[in-house]
Structure formats: C-alpha cells, structure tokens
Amino acid sequence: MRKTTAFAGLGLAAALVLTGCSATAEEPMDETMTEEPAVVDTVNSDGAALRAQLTALLADHVYLAGAAIDQALADGGDLTTADVEAAVATVDENSVEIAALVGSVYPDAEQAFLDSWRSHIPFFVNYTLGKATGDEDLAAQAVEDLNGYAVSFGQLINSVVPELPAEAVQGELEMHAVSLLAAIDANIAGDPEYFSLLKEAAGHMPMTATALAGGIAANAGIE
C-alpha cells in the first residue's frame, strides 16, 4: 500500500491525466471467395489511416495517463521530480498529437479541440487526490465534473461533425472515464488488478476511434 500523505500538491497536476492500443487489426481474408473482389483498397485508404492513427493515439492516451499516475503515486505526490515532469510532458505531447490529427481535417477546430481535451485533466487529478487522501467529497465532485465534461465534449464534436450525435460521443467519453477511474482505484489500493484494468480501459479506444473517425470521414468526404 502506497503512502498518500504527500498528496497535498497533487491538485496542481493540471497536465497529469491528459491524453488515448495499437492500430486496428487486419481483418482475416474470406477463404471461401474464389474471385478477387472488385473493391477499393480500404486498408490503404485515407479513412482507414485516420481510424488507425486515432486508435493508436487514444490508446496511448490511456497507457501514458496510467504511467503518469503511477509515477506520481510512486513519488508520493511530489510533482516536481524529474520523472513525474517527464511523464506529464509525454502525456501532453500525446494530447497535442490528437488535436493535430483532428486539425488535419478541421484546421479551425484544432485549438478548440485541444483546449477542451485539456480541460478535463483537473477532474482526473482531483479524483486521484480525493481517493488517495480519503476525501470522498472531492472524488465525488470529480466524477460529477467528468460527467459534465462528457456532455460538453459531445456537444463540441457534434457542432463540428453533425454526423456524430452528441449523445453518442458523450457515451464514449463516459465509458472512457469509468474504465480509467477503475484503474486509478486499483492503482491507489496497490491492487495488481490495476494492470488488467488499464488494459481494459485501453481496449475501449478502438471502438471510440472507429466511431469518431467514421463520423469525421463521412462529414469531410474522406474515403
């Protein structure tokens, strides 16, 4: 069990849990086909590339966030150590990459996306702080804030990509939050189940990436 007495400074970790699995697996060939199908090359299409890149970045988001949290816990909440600062910087680099990918299709929306994506960082931080110090009110408020963020993020995405219903995006963000919070709980408790829970959280990312990339491709006419 980790000591948590040094967590008074954890709320300053505004970049701790930001940004998000590997590229999608190649689909098996249908061995019953006797003739070569006359279809477009979907594997090498721009739409497939967008989906694969988004999947990889979102899965990285989960694993990098987990690594940053783990490092902060290991260092007793001291966010000034070189290891913690390096972990935080790497997490933020990932968020910038996600925003840049969105910006490659919607240049005018890149900064707004990045600002919104970064804004949920303190909520994960506050949850970690609350659970680590036994402040259940702080943890509960963080969950409420994350739920509110899911709503606003869904509305933002829908305003740019009408093909993506705000409620559907909200649902994907809520699933992401619930799964990552479960991993955080296990990490704080020193439960070895943490690793499988983190993997499970990352395992949700291909579905999220597929939904987002599909809507973006449809809206932008990407094939």
Image (tube, rainbow, N blue to C red):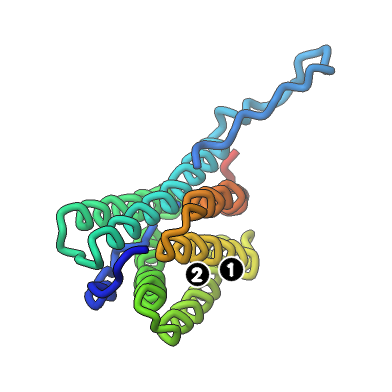
**Viewer-side residue, 47 vs 79:** 79
Whether residue 150 is situated above or below residue 203 in the rendered picture = below
Which numbered dot is residue 170?
Answer: 1
Tell me where residue 91 sits by quadrant: bottom left
The structure residue drawn at horizontal position 44% and vertical position 53%, both measured from the top left corner, is 62
The structure residue drawn at horizontal position 42% and vertical position 60%, both measured from the top left corner, is 190
Q: In x, y percent, where is residue 145? A: 46, 79
Whole-number angstrom distance, CA of label 1 to CA of label 2: 7 Å
- SS of the residue under disc 1: helix
Query: Disc 1 marks which amino acid?
Result: Gln
- SS of the residue under disc 2: helix
Q: Circle 2 is placed at which residue position?
A: 153
The structure residue drawn at horizontal position 56% and vertical position 39%, both measured from the top left corner, is 47
Of the image marks 1 and 2, the number of the one nearer the N terminus: 2
Q: Is residue 148 left or right of residue 89?
A: right
Which numbered dot is residue 188?
Answer: none
